[in-house]
Image: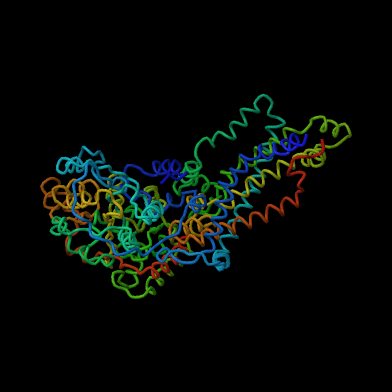
Amino acid sequence: MSQRPTNDFERIFEELVRDEMTRRHLIRRGAAGALSLSAIAYLAACGETGGGKEESKVIPKGQLSKTLYVANWPLYIDSKNPNKGTLGKFKKKYGASVKYVEEINDNDQFFGKVRQQYDRGSSGGRDLHVVTDWMAGRMQRLGYVQKLDKSQLPNVQKNLLDKLRHPSFDRNRDYTAPWQGIQAGIIYRKDKVKRTPKSVNDIFDPDYKGKTTMLTEMRDTVGLVMLGMGEDPETFSGVDPALKAIDKIDKAAKSGQVRRFTGNEYTKDITKGDSWLIYGWSGDAIQLQADNPNIDFVQPDEGWIYSNDNMQVPVGAPHAFTGEKFIDFVYRPEVQAPIAAYVNYVTPVKGVKEILEKQDPELASSQLIFPSGETLKRAKIFRDLKPDEERKVNEAFQKVIGA
Amino acid sequence: MEAVQRRKGLLPYLLLAPGLGWLLVFFAIPLGYMAYESLKAGTIDTGFSFSWEFSNYTHAISTYKEQFVRSFEYAGLATLLSLVIGYPLAYVIAFRGGKWRNALLLAVILPFFVTYLIRTLSWETILDDESWVVDTLKAAGLVSNDGRVLDTTASVVAGITYNFLPFMILPLYASLERIDHRLLEAAYDLYGKRRAVFTRVTLPLSMPGVVAGVLLTFIPAAGDFVNATLLGTPRQAMIGNVIQSRFQVIADYPSAAALSFILMGLILVLVLAWARFAGTESLMGSEPR
C-alpha cells in the first residue's frame, strides 16, 4: 500500500510528542489519529468491506523462513536491531532475521491502514501484528487472522498468566497471545492534590475542576467510571451501565470538571501541572516518575482496567509458521525478562519475576509491573462487546469526547 | 483550410487536457466515489453496501448541527480577526515598507516554514496553565486567577487566526501594492482628507484583496480540526473533528463522507453568497484602473 500523504506530518508530530519517557502508546488514539489530515483523500481509497470470512484454518507446520515481519508499537521491545537483544537471540536459535517495524501507533489507525489488504487475504508481508484486546476481537470476527497451532506453542501453554487464559474475545486463546499488559488507573501529582487519591471517583472532586483529564481509549475511561458507579466492567450485561457511565462523563466534560480527553499526550499535561489527577496508564507513570518524583500511579480501591496487546498472525502471512515460533519464543521466561525490564508494562509470562528478582529486585517487587495474583484479581478486563454494542457505546463515547 | 481551422479549434482543448485530466483523476473521480460512499448503509462488521441511504445526510445534520454551527462561528471570527490584524499590517508594508518591504513580507511568511502542527503544538506549550504568559495575563487582570487560557474557545479561535493569517495578509498586500499612487495623489489634490481618501479610494481599490483573503482564510478555517484538537476541549470540537472520528475511530465511512459533503455544500453556499455580496468583479480583480 502506498504511503499516506500525511506520513511526514505525522512523523514529525510524533517525534515532537515522543519524549524519551513514552514507550508505546505515544499517541494511542489521541492526537496523531486526529491529525491525519488526509481523511477526505483517504476516503476515496476505501473499498467495500467484505466482512464475514470463512472459518480460518489452523496454521500448518512448515519450514522455518529466513525472515520474519513483526508489526508492533513503538518502544515496545528492548532492541529492534535484528542482531541484538531478543531479536538477535531469535535469529541465533531459528535463523530468521526479524524485520521489526514500529508501525502501530493507534489501533484504529492501524486497522484503517491494513483493512483493505487483510480483506483481500493479503497481510502486506506482515507475519505478526500486535493489537489491543478489542481490536484483536474485531480482527478475528472479520476473519483477518489465522488460528494458532497450540502444539507449536508449548511455552505459551505453560507460562501464560492464568488471568489471561480465557478472555471473552478469544475464549481459548486460539487466535492470540498477549504481548504486554496495560493497567489504566489514576495518575496524580503528589504536590497538587489535597490527599492521596483512593477512588476512581476522586476525578469528580470539585477541588480538581479543570485539572483532570480522561483517556480517549473508550474501554479504559468508561470502565473506570463504571467501577466508581458500582458496576463490573468484566461482566455487566447490556449496554446501559456503559451508557450511564458515559452520561456521567458527559456531565463532567460539559461542566468543565474534566478538561479534555487525551491519548498518551496526558504525560505533557501532568508534567506541566495543567492536570493534577487523571486517568492514565501505569507504564507511563513509572517512566514519568523517573523524572518527576511527584508523579505517582494508584490502583484504585474499586479496581482498575487491565487490557493487553496481543500478537496475531494475519491472513496471508508469508511466514506464519516462523511467526508461531516467535510467539512461543518470547514466552520463555529468560527471553521475556529483558523485554519486561525494558517496557515496564505488565508481562503476561510467568517466571519472569523470579528471574528479575536476582537482577533488579526493586523492579521485580513493583506491583505495577508484576502484580501478584491477589492484586490482579482486582484488575478488570473490559468485557468483549458485540459489534452492535460496540457501535452504540463507541458512538455515545465519541460524542462526549468531542466528535 | 478546413483542416487548419479544425486544428485551431482543437488546440485550446489540447492545452487544457493536462489540467482537466488532473482535475478528473484527483478531484472528480474521488468526489464521485465519495458521493457513492456517502449513500451506503451498513457497519464495519457487516460490510457497507450501496442503497441510496439519504438518511446518512439528514442524520448527520441533525446530530452534528452544534459542531457545524460552531465551525462557522469560529471560522467567521478568525476571518474577521485576521482582517482586522492583517489589513493595517498589509497597508504598512505596501505603503510605508520602503526598502524593507521584502524583508517584512518574509517575516510574515517565515513562521510558516515550520509545519502547521509544530506551530500549533508550540502554542499549546506557550499557553500552559503555569507558563509565564498566563502568569503575566493573570497579573494584568486579563485572566481570572483560577482561569486558564489553554483549552478555551479563545485559544482555539486565536490558534485558527494565527495559522491562517498569512492567507489574509498576502492577498491584501498584493492588492494594496498594485494601487496606482497617482490616484491617491489626485484624491489629495482634490482636497480629500486622509480619511476620505482611504475610505473612497484605497479601500475600494483593495477590495479584491479583501475578498480573496476572506475566502482563503474562511474556507480552510471552517474545515480545520487541528486547533480544536490541540488547543481546545470537546466543548470546542469542530465539524472536522467529527469527520475525523467518524472516519477513523468509529469506522463509519458513509456518515463521514456525508458530513464532508454537507460541509462542502455549506461552504459553497457561503462563498457564493459572499461573492454576490462583494461582487464578482472584485473577486476577479478587474477593478477600474
The colour scheme applied to this rendered structure is rainbow
In the image, B198: left or right of A180?
A: right
The C terminus of chain B, quarter of image? top right
Residue at point 46%, 62% (across, down): B252
Identified at 14% across, 43% down, the residue is: A93
Is B56 left, or right, of A170 in this rendering? right
The percent position of residue A127, horizontal first and vertical second, equals 27, 49
Most foreground residue, B95 or A178: A178
Q: Is residue B128 above or below residue B37?
A: above
Residue B7 occupies quadrant:
top right
Q: Quadrant of residue A252?
A: bottom left
Count of marks overlaid on the render: 0
Query: For the N terminus of chain B, which image quadrant?
Result: top right
Viewer-side residue, A350 vs A252: A350
- Asked where in the image residue B288 lies, by quadrant, the reply is top right
Q: Residue at x 88, y 35 (%)?
A: B191
Give how far across and how far down residue B88 sits, in percent.
69, 39
A10 w.r.t. A351: above or below: above
Q: Position of residue A375 (x, y in %)?
A: 20, 63
Residue A283 % position (x, y): 28, 52
Is A247 on the left-hand or right-hand side of B264?
left
Q: Which residue of the protein is positioned furthest toward the top in this rendering?
A: B99
